[in-house]
Amino acid sequence: MKPFHETRQKIRAELESAAPQRVFGSGWASGVLGIGLSLAGLLLVISMRAPGQLLAVPEIAPLQANHWFKLGVLLLLVGGFASSIVSLALREAKILGTTGVLLALAATVIGQSIVTANAAHPLPIYFGLDWFALNVLFTGLIFIPIERLNPHDENQPIFRDEWREDVFYVLVSSLMVQALAFLPQNPGILAGKLSALGSVRHWVGSLPLLVQIPIIMFAADFFQYWAHRAFHRIPWLWNFHAVHHSAQSMDWMSGARMHFVEILLIRSITAIPVLALGFTPLAVEVYVLLAYVYTTLIHANLGWRLPIIDQLLVTPQFHHWHHGADKEAIDVNFAIHFPLFDRLFGTYHLPKDQWPTSYGIEGHPVPKGYWAQLIYPFRRK
């Protein structure tokens, strides 16, 4: 265990190197890129080789047999290996390059040695290892450059404090993506079978897809507004929601920091009414994707000024005020999509050209680290 711990510490120290050690040509960027690409390729290979597609999301599983998908995974590994070699050549400390090379080689060995079972997975649950890899890879490729082009906090590094914890939050939610969706769906479907909702469900389900999606956004935001507000006002719910607010820096990963109990409750509160009303599964899936990207956007380290759009839609500046540690930022801006709800119910706060001076909770009572945050709501205060 000691050599593993020392290696992990070395990798952590390299990833958190000071800015002068990250300059172009130092091998730091290529080393980080090599680890990212190789790790994504490794996770995708494992998900492809797992028995009965246990680690594959059903929507992605059919793609795994496609030659282009396999070629994409191969290119990931080749890119990760090549970037790691460049890091080994340029950087004095070899830990980043070595780690990337080992991850790429491990993916190659696993891809060649493990026999995939053809039996169907018997449980109504899966662990989306492939979704996690694609999620982090492509979301990062989209938002990291955008944050660098127009950041709100120009001094905030890409790998800011506690970024590892938030990546782990993304992993946990991705591994249980279907399980978290499965729990609220069944009650929603059962509720939708009530005779009183039959005609409503038929009418809603017959609406065009482009009409259903904005209605879902509006309905989900209404229910989530009140659920979100309850998490701030009811002490035992706040204990769980405080984990989300414990982030002291805002970027594209900070939105993933949510206690699993809160995820279950919020998804149930918002998903059951939507599913009970009879929206088609495709419309719900499209909304879930849009909501995920939108949530990532409003948490991102972006300094955009959107003086017209922010009257209609939630923007990064609007939601940053919800996470602010300033006194004027307490219990404001609960909406996720439409500021209209905050205007209607008296919780709207968006001073012109102003941002919070800091983020988190006064006194920072929530401990750092995933496992400490996991048990935090259950501890006696």
Image (cartoon, grey):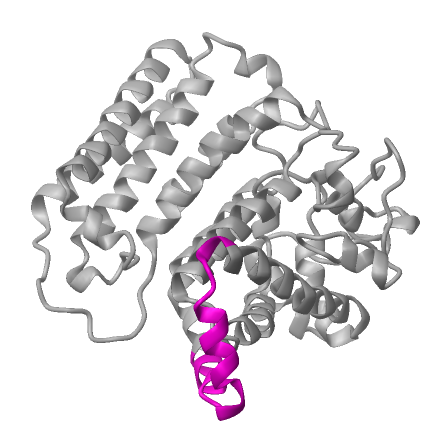
Give the left or right position of residue 120, taking residue 10 as reference.
left
In which quadrant of the rendered view does residue 250 lie? top right
As for residue 170 lying within the magenta part, the answer is: no
Give the vertical position of 273 relative to 314 (above or below): below
Magenta span: predominant SS is: helix
Which x, y percent locates residue 322? 78, 50
Give the left or right position of residue 380, taking residue 285 as reference.
right
State whether residue 10 appears in this view.
no
Which x, y percent locates residue 227? 69, 70
Query: Which is more toward the observer, 101 or 316?
Result: 316
Name which residue lies at 32% across and 70% down. 125
- Please tell me how many numbered marks the rendered image carries: 0
As for residue 189 lying within the magenta part, the answer is: yes
Of the 4 image quadrants, the one containing the C terminus is bottom right
Give the left or right position of residue 73, taking residue 231 as reference.
left
Name which residue lies at 8% across and 63% down. 118
Which x, y percent locates residue 5? 43, 43
Which x, y percent locates residue 109? 14, 40
Name which residue lies at 17% across and 32% down. 71
Q: Which region is colored magenta?
A: 186-210
Query: Which is more toward the observer, 337 or 21?
Result: 337
In which quadrant of the rendered view does residue 27 lie? top left
Name which residue lies at 32% across and 29% down. 100
Query: Which is more toward the observer, 242 or 348?
Result: 348
State whether residue 344 appears in this view.
yes
